[in-house]
Image (cartoon, rainbow, N blue to C red):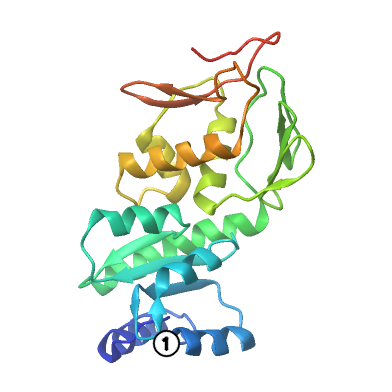
Amino acid sequence: MLDDEDEITSLLDHALSRDGYDVSTVRTISGFRDKQADEAFDIYIIDLGLPDGNGMSLIQELSRNPACGVIILSGRTADTDRIVGLEIGADDYIQKPFPMRELAARVRAVLRRTQKNKTAQDEVGPASGNATDTENAIAFDGYRLDLGARLLFAPDGNEIELTTAEFNLLVALLNRRGQVLDRDQLMNAIKGRDWEVYDRAVDSIVSRLRRKLPVPEGRSHYIRTVHGIGYAFSLPSNGHSGCS
């Protein structure tokens, strides 16, 4: 847990220890670095405003490991902070002040999701178009999504770097390809039901995915916008776009 407020860290330490968790607290990013070098953790609770830096860059770094959960703890009330936190890969955002029971429930929810990431991804739906599925990978139009390693490879074999949110959204669309998913369904797939739906957050993640998954000139993108509803993943058929 990384927070510079003594009262907050003491309360969290007491509440989470009482629930059976082993808790370690630090108050600065440099202290966190020292602690991280010696120990591995299942979940990180991080404040945004810290004496020696902004927690956002640290959260983005930690979110690259899908087996670790990241919860933002902040007194900031702007929706922008929640949206940015989601986009860079945090699992949840808790605004100060907060009930301890709520915090404990959110910690349990994040741990359930990260434990699933340690073992296997959700079952992949039936293939359609020219996409092919195996137990641990989905291939489409030359791209290959490795579910176990949580990596995406371009047709030329190079890795395409994805944030946790981008990867989870792409998997959700591929699992239900050909079907329209609304923003609420996509947000649940990305972060679970504890997150409120922010249309701008989902739209921003889709926009970034489109840039990272280029299609040949003259073809519509795989991720199709269904106005007023949400998004669907479609593949071209017989050389023509499957998107309208």
What percent of the width, then of the height, locates residue 64? 58, 61
Does any portion of residue 97 appear in the rendered image?
Answer: yes
**SS category of the residue bearing label 1:** loop
What percent of the width, then of the height, locates residue 109? 43, 60
Residue at position x 79%, y 37% from top?
Answer: 156
Q: Which residue is mark 1?
A: 28
User: Taking 208 as reference, is 148 left or right?
Assistant: right
Residue at position x 64%, y 34% from top?
Answer: 124
What percent of the width, then of the height, locates residue 16? 39, 80
Identified by mark 1, the residue type is Thr
Residue at position x 35%, y 65% from top?
Answer: 105
Q: Would you place residue 138 above or below residue 237 in this image?
A: below
Foreground residue among 240 and 197: 240
Residue at position x 33%, y 82% from top?
Answer: 12
Q: Would you place residue 164 above or below residue 44 in this image?
A: above
User: Taking 223 as reference, is 227 left or right?
Assistant: left
